[in-house]
Amino acid sequence: MSSHSIGVDIGGTKVAAGLVDAEGRILHRAEFPMYVLGSAEQAMECVRSAICKVLDEARKNGATVGSIGVASPGPLALPEGVVVSSPNLPCWRNFRLGDAIRAEYRMTTIIDNDANAAGLAEALWGAGAEYASIFCATIGTGIGTALVLNKQLYYGHTAVAPEGGHMTIDLHAAVHCDCGKRGCLEGMASGPSMARRARERLSGSKSYDAALWGSDLAQINPRVIAAAWRAGDPVATDILRETCDLYAVWLGNVIDLVEPAAIVIGGGLSSLFSEWFDYICKILPSCSIVPGAG
């Protein structure tokens, strides 16, 4: 059987791995919790568990594995594959992830930013396959971005770009992101940021619907906000509308800067925000000088 690859997606809460053929089809999957609050070695053991599970499945089915591709939250030092200081992976600081995997499995290993990996996949096989240039955003615990030009990833001068989720959209905001910047998009519009704003809004109210929000405001997350919005809750509606206003301003800036042929939105919260795309597209023209934006 021809050689296959293992794809690994490292996140702040889980590690997913899959056996992938040359056409990008996922033949087997494995998923393990990611422990990010302990030591570097404890986190690395989570990654090993996912890779080894897929390797075992490949061997059972007679598949030859020739390479490993790893998508990790950035910022990263490429092409070496060093996790520099990801806000979502506090367990790793200047951690040589690429070297660790190569030493363990003795096969070609490529590390890239998770948003870059998602963007390239969309450009080659997904929603951006018909376009020469795309801007891809993955929205979830963090906000990652990729810029693909003529089916090639754009990395910038030092291979750190594009960290579009950390573009400042409100210099005077009281919010500081874990990246250290004030008022960047991730600090104001990611999943945890939405939950924080909801808690702040509700903690000052004595009349919120506990049946929708729960008795413990600390447990609020984007799923709770989405359910409350669908039930017609005004606080949830305001939170989502404000968040989409921020995304419209941000995407308007992106369009003015690079004018991609298409914008692709993915990530864990993409399904929720797809229900707000019409709203974003309606106000996007007022946020960009490019004719036809939105």
Image (cartoon, rainbow, N blue to C red):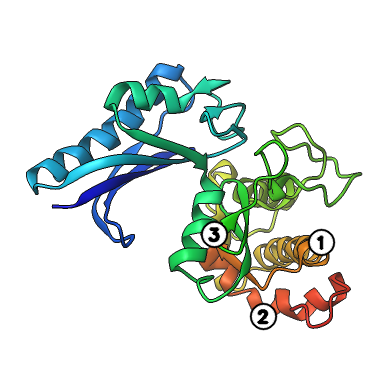
Taking the spot 89% from the left edge, 45% from the top edge, the residue there is 171
Q: Nearer the viewer, residue 131 or 34?
A: 131
Q: Amino acid at mark 3?
A: Leu
| Visible residue check, residue 60 | yes
Which residue is tagged 2? 278
Residue 269, disc: 3
Label 1: which secondary element: helix
Which residue is tagged 1? 257
Residue 95 x %, y %: 52, 21
Q: Quadrant of residue 175?
A: top right
Q: Quadrant of residue 161?
A: top right
Q: Amino acid at mark 1?
A: Leu
Q: Which corner quadrant holds the C terminus?
A: bottom right
Mark 3 vs mark 1: in front = 1
Label 3: which secondary element: loop
Q: Amino acid at mark 2?
A: Asp
